[in-house]
Image (cartoon, rainbow, N blue to C red):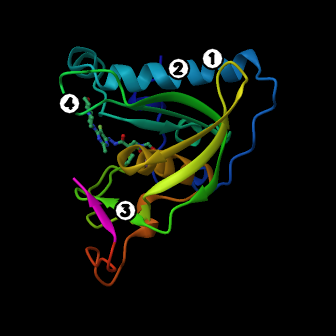
């Protein structure tokens, strides 16, 4: 089971590497990796387990954060309306690839954090508002989906990790909260 001890922190060179694609058909090892990553996210969002296991909350995780330089990410984004608790996006993605994106940009109003960064780095992280994404799912099937807003932001943060990019690389050093016209701020 993955806990915070398994998550490497900034300074570890693996976080700055471009990760390798995983072989298709998926190996049992890579399928287990995806399952363990998804389990971590669910545990981190369960108040009891998160407390027991001292987990920081997470809605996404990338294999390089486990010192595994493979193109595997997991996302588990809960819906924010308490009526239907179904997650809006829950998937393990192998070899995810952004095929196209909107001209429209967006950022989270609260900025971003990272389980591999033990400090606050304030500022807007401007990303694409909408993306069309292909990936191989844990059944080995090719998927092609369109995401927007919060879900699109989360997936872009994770895919950045596969390319050695950290969220603060996107923050405007001169003025961290500078925003070009038309950037959607997602609260
Ligand atoms: C937005 C948010 N980021 C949390 N953490 N950071 C992460 O997930 C990092 C990845 C996210 C940072 C910004 C975009 C992607 C992890 N990363 O570094 C992976 O590369 C949260 F924990 C969180 N939520 C809201 C939903 N809540 C449901 C109940 O449980 C607590 C949970 C808290 N929302
Ligand atoms: Ni991160």
Which residue is rendered at x = 33% and y = 21% of the image?
86
Q: Which mark is residue 32?
A: 1
Q: Which one is closest to the eye, mark 4 or mark 1?
A: 4
Is 93 in the magenta?
Answer: no
Which residue is rendered at x = 47% and y = 55% of the image?
130
Looking at the image, residue 89 lies above or below residue 182: above
Q: Residue furthest left?
A: 82
Residue 25 position, x and y percent, is 81, 23
Quarter of the rendered image showing ligand 1: top left
Which residue is rendered at x = 68% and y = 54% of the image?
18
Residue 167 position, x and y percent, is 43, 59
Residue located beneath label 2 in the image: 36
**Lower sequence index among marks 3 and 4:** 4
Which residue is rendered at x = 51% and y = 62% of the image?
102
Residue located beneath label 3 in the image: 106
Would you call the spot at circle 1 few (<14 residues within 10 Å), some (14-19), or many (20 or more)? few
Residue 34 in which image quadrant:
top right
- Do labels 2 and 1 touch, CB within 8 Å? yes
Residue 147 position, x and y percent, is 48, 45
Q: Secondary structure at mark 3?
A: strand
Residue toward you, 112 or 115: 112
Residue located beneath label 4 in the image: 81
What is the spatial separation of the Cα atoms under label 2 and label 3, in whole angstroms? 30 Å
Looking at the image, residue 140 lies above or below residue 187: above
- Do labels 2 and 3 touch, CB within 8 Å? no
Q: Secondary structure at mark 4?
A: loop
Q: Which one is closest to the eye, mark 2 or mark 3?
A: 3
């Amino acid at each position: 089971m993955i806990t915070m001890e398994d998550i490497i922190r900034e300074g570890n060179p693996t976080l700055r590497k471009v990760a390798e694609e995983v072989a298709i058909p998926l190996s049992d090892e890579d399928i287990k990796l995806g399952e363990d990553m998804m389990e971590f996210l669910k545990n981190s969002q369960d108040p009891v387990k998160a407390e027991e296991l001292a987990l920081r909350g997470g809605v996404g995780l990338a294999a390089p954060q486990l010192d595994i330089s493979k193109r595997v990410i997991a996302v588990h984004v809960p819906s924010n309306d308490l009526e239907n608790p179904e997650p809006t996006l829950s998937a393990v993605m192998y070899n995810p690839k952004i095929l196209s994106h909107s001209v429209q940009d967006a950022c989270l109003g609260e900025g971003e954090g990272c389980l591999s960064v033990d400090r606050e780095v304030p500022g807007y992280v401007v990303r694409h508002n909408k993306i069309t994404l292909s990936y191989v799912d844990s059944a080995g099937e090719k998927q092609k989906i369109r995401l927007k807003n919060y879900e699109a932001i989360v997936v872009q943060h994770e895919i950045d990790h596969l390319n050695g990019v950290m969220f603060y690389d996107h923050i405007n050093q001169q003025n961290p909260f500078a925003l070009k016209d038309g950037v959607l701020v997602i609260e």
